[in-house]
């Protein structure tokens, strides 16, 4: 009986996640193609806020504490993720955030404070559901593959919105090769880090998120150095 009830709970959470992201995808399409004179940065900033509001509402309405705890964790991490983007754009000068009508944090467009929440929530949520249904090993493989697809896909497509783009690095299409492994590491570290602190308070979540950000920043710098050194030698 308990196993049956648990499976029903999983199906309900998965259904919620599917509906949320299907609805958000539709909102994204409407927002992006809307024939109004609104700059890209403002549109993306609005979409980030809408996504957060939808997640919070669903978590509150369903009284799903785990859902809300995951949102809190990835939101904190998304705020910290401004620093790696700032380093890559201001110091290494291999990432560009063009003028898009929105305020900037250093060289980084303001919507990036919350944009990382979207892929990270999906990645960790999928990882958690896979682990409950299968095993930790299969969940790790799923998280790594999904991280590659989601982050690689965003690199390949978001430049069309006049958002960020890479420069002066080895690329395939519009994807900077050096960043792929760090993004897989980011997905795996976020999934594992959340497992460690999901039942802890915000302080622990903040410390874990800060550590994950540093891991991503360091791996991005390392793989940029190694790959570009090999290519140019």
Image (cartoon, rainbow, N blue to C red):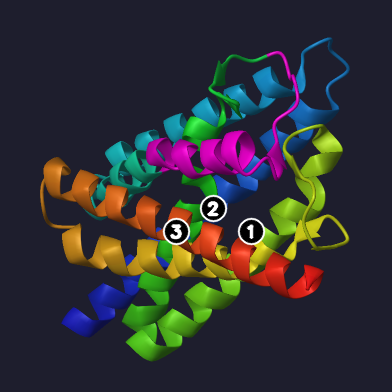
Magenta segment:
78-101
The mark found on residue 218 in the picture is 3
Note whether residue 124 is visible.
Answer: yes
Helix, strand or loop at mark 2? helix
Residue 66: horizontal and vertical position, in percent? Answer: 25, 54
Of badges 3 and 2, nearer the viewer stands 3
The answer to whether mark 2 and mark 1 are in CB contact below 8 A is yes
Q: Which residue is drawn at 58% across and 49% down?
A: 21
Disc 1: CA contacts within 10 A as few (<14), some (14-19) or many (>=20): some
* Spatial CA span between label 2 and label 1: 8 Å
Q: Residue at x 14, y 50 (%)?
A: 204
Height in image: 214 above or below 143? above
- Give the mark nearest the N terminus, 1 or 3: 1
The mark found on residue 206 in the picture is none
The mark found on residue 151 in the picture is 1
* Spatial CA span between label 1 and label 3: 18 Å
Height in image: 176 above or below 20? below
Q: Mark 2 points at which residue?
A: 119
- Give the mark nearest the N terminus, 2 or 1: 2
Helix, strand or loop at mark 1? helix
Of badges 2 and 1, nearer the viewer stands 1
The image quarter in which residue 57 lies: top left
Q: In this view, does 202 lie to the left or right of 38?
A: left
Q: Which of 179 and 226 is in front in this view?
A: 226
Height in image: 194 above or below 7? above
Q: Is residue 184 left or right of residue 66?
A: right
């Amino acid at each position: 009986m308990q196993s049956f009830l648990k499976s029903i709970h999983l199906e309900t959470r998965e259904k919620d996640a599917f509906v949320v992201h299907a609805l958000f995808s539709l909102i994204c399409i409407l927002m992006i193609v809307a024939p109004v004179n609104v700059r890209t940065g403002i549109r993306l900033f609005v979409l980030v806020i809408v996504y957060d509001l939808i997640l919070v509402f669903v978590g509150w309405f369903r009284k799903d504490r785990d859902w809300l705890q995951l949102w809190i964790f990835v939101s904190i991490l998304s705020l910290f993720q401004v620093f790696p983007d700032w380093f890559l754009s201001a110091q290494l000068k291999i990432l560009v955030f063009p003028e898009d009508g929105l305020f900037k944090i250093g060289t980084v467009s303001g919507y990036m404070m919350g944009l990382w929440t979207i892929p990270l929530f999906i990645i960790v949520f999928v990882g958690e559901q896979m682990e409950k249904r299968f095993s930790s090993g299969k969940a790790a493989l799923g998280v790594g593959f999904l991280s590659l697809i989601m982050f690689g896909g965003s690199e390949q497509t978001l430049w069309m919105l006049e958002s960020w783009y890479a420069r002066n690095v080895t690329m395939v299409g519009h994807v900077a090769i050096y960043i792929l492994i760090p993004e897989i590491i980011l997905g795996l570290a976020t999934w594992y880090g959340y497992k460690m602190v999901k039942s802890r308070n915000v302080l622990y979540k903040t410390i874990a998120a800060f550590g994950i950000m540093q891991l991503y920043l360091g791996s991005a710098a390392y793989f940029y150095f190694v790959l570009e050194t090999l290519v140019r030698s």
